[in-house]
Amino acid sequence: MAGGRCCEAGAQLEWKTSNPAESDVSHAYVELEHVSLRYGGADGTLALNAASLSVNEGEFVAVVGPSGCGKSTLMRLVTGLWQPSAGQVFVAGNAVSGPLSIAGMAFQNPTLLPWRNVLDNVMLPLEIVRPHRRRLRRERAEYEARAKALLALVGLGGFEARFPWQLSGGMQQRVSLCRALIHEPRLLMLDEPFGALDIFTREELWAILQEVWMARRPTVILVTHDLREAAFLADRVCVMSARPGRILISRSVDLPRPRTLESTYLPAFTALTHDLRTYISEAREQVHA
Ligand code: ADP
């Protein structure tokens, strides 16, 4: 998209992707094939059992499920932080065998470095991820402009020189989102990024994330326990079974975009979240039965 709508006047990013309406969402970008993971050896915890999931390129998928069912484990496997005990994980057609540099990540805890200001926190992945690491010295001004444009997009224009301890939790999480996006990852992995925030801040960030996604169309996997969040943001919601986890249900969200907070009170939206809640209750009951 040529310049997504931004939160602050004049803040425009030059997106590298084409118009979202023209985006190709027909190719599987992330593929889990019968993936199992047991932590701690043969007598350890079986977190995932033959879990399969396919996420198209440019698709926004939310993963929900009972607590402890293996959602974070699934994220660690896709990003290559852990290797499966059985089955295979593919990203962009390649088997994942180590940490992925094409992924941007954000977690519930923003984990900003306290000695770095906002701009330098956002720039951090560029110092690590190739080919940016090599280019950074020569093209620092361009990269800084990109970081500032991202910060403006999330409503943090003018906060570049502040330090994390000078920011609210919601502002820190916005910085964390910018840091996840700065190297223009094709895959964005979000593990309960808004879980620690109050509902108003959370809803504000949903709108921002939707805007960023519509503008750049990365492939997104979002783990959340908030069913409204899943329904608001995702193209598809995958419901996991209780541990050992696997994907039980995959449900498309056929609501037009951009979605608004008002739309979350419409019957189609509340019916969807109600169904999701029922699926999760059933998944939990299976284990207690
Ligand atoms: P969720 O994100 O759905 O809450 P997790 O993926 O964090 O679930 O955990 C799934 C199961 O694996 C839980 O029983 C958890 O205690 C266990 N687990 C997670 N990480 C580890 C680990 N590093 N070592 C041992 N067990 C773990």
Image (tube, grey):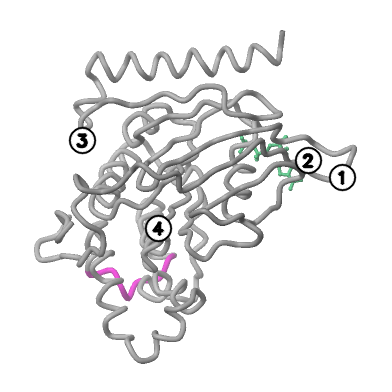
Q: Would you call the spot at circle 3 few (<14 residues within 10 Å), some (14-19), or many (20 or more)? A: few
Residue 71, which numbered label? none
N-terminal of the two: label 3 or label 4?
4
Q: Amino acid at mark 4?
A: Arg
Task: Give the main secondary structure, helix, strand or loop, of the magenta stretch.
Answer: loop
Q: CA distance from mark 1 to mark 3?
A: 45 Å
**Quarter-of-image position of residue 268:** top left
Q: CA distance from mark 1 to mark 4?
A: 33 Å
Q: Which residue is mark 1?
A: 41
Residue 186, which numbered label? 4
Residue 257, which numbered label? 3
Q: CA distance from mark 4 to mark 2?
A: 29 Å
Q: Would you call the spot at circle 2 few (<14 residues within 10 Å), some (14-19), or many (20 or more)? A: some
Q: Which residue is mark 2?
A: 38
Q: Let me know if residue 174 is in the magenta part.
A: no
Foreground mark, 4 or 2, reads: 4
Of residues 48 and 111, the one drawn nearer to the viewer in this rendering: 48
Query: SS for tag 1?
Result: loop
N-terminal of the two: label 1 or label 3?
1
Q: CA distance from mark 3 to mark 4?
A: 21 Å
Is disc 2 in contact with disc 1, using a CB cutoff of under 8 Å?
yes
In what quadrant does ligand 1 lie? top right
